[in-house]
Image: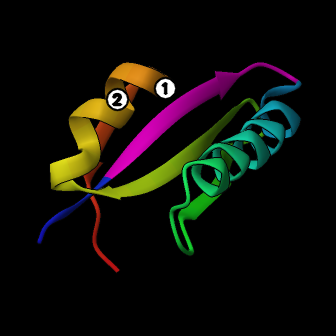
Amino acid sequence: MRKLKLIWDFKGPDGIKTAEHHAIHLKEYMDAKNHKDPITGFEALNEFHAIAFLVVSEDEMKSLRDALKPHRGQVYSD
């Protein structure tokens, strides 16, 4: 099954720290929903733009998208 990467963008001088903190909450949310080993994290794209992300299977994307409201998404590849 195809996997999708849900993405939240954070911009500005505090973007990296905010994305890092958001990724912690994404993992906590998935743990609370009993998802085993969720793929979450953050990535600094430059000093003023960072992302937090959550990788989900295509069949669970709609419910998680509606609950978590990511800014965008893309197909995930390992």
Q: Point out which mark residue 65 bears.
A: 2
Residue 7 position in % (x across, y down): 46, 38
Q: Secondary structure at mark 2?
A: helix
Residue occupying image coordinates x 39% and y 42%: 6
Q: Spatial distance from mark 1 to mark 2, Cα to Cα?
A: 5 Å
State which region is magenta.
Answer: 5-13
Residue 70 in the figure: left or right of residue 40: left
Q: Is residue 54 left or right of residue 15?
A: left
Q: Which residue occupies 29% across, 32% down?
A: 63
Magenta stretch prevailing secondary structure: strand
| Quadrant (top left/top right/bottom left/bottom right) for the N terminus | bottom left
Q: Residues within 10 Å of mark 1 (few under 14, many from 20)?
A: few
Identity of the residue drawn at 31% across and 38% down:
73
Query: What residue type is disc 2 on?
Result: Arg
Q: Give residue 35's position: percent from left, percent from top.
A: 51, 63
Dot label at residue 68: 1
Q: Picture coordinates of residue 31 (x, y %)?
A: 65, 57
Name the residue located 73 percent from the left edge and 37 percent from the top edge.
19
Q: Position of residue 58 (x, y in %)?
A: 17, 53
Q: For the C terminus, give its image quadrant.
A: bottom left
Does 26 sit above or below residue 56? Answer: above
User: Is the residue 60 above or below the residue 64 in the image?
Assistant: below
Badge 2 crowding class, 10 Å Cα cut-off, few under 14, some 14 to 19, many 20 or more, is some
Mark 1 secondary-structure assignment: helix
CB-based contact (under 8 Å), mark 1 and mark 2: yes
The tag on residue 46 is none
Question: Which residue lies most toward the bottom here?
Answer: 78
Q: Which quarter of the picture shows residue 71?
A: top left
Q: Does the magenta-highlighted stretch encompass residue 74?
A: no
| Amino acid marked by disc 1 | Leu
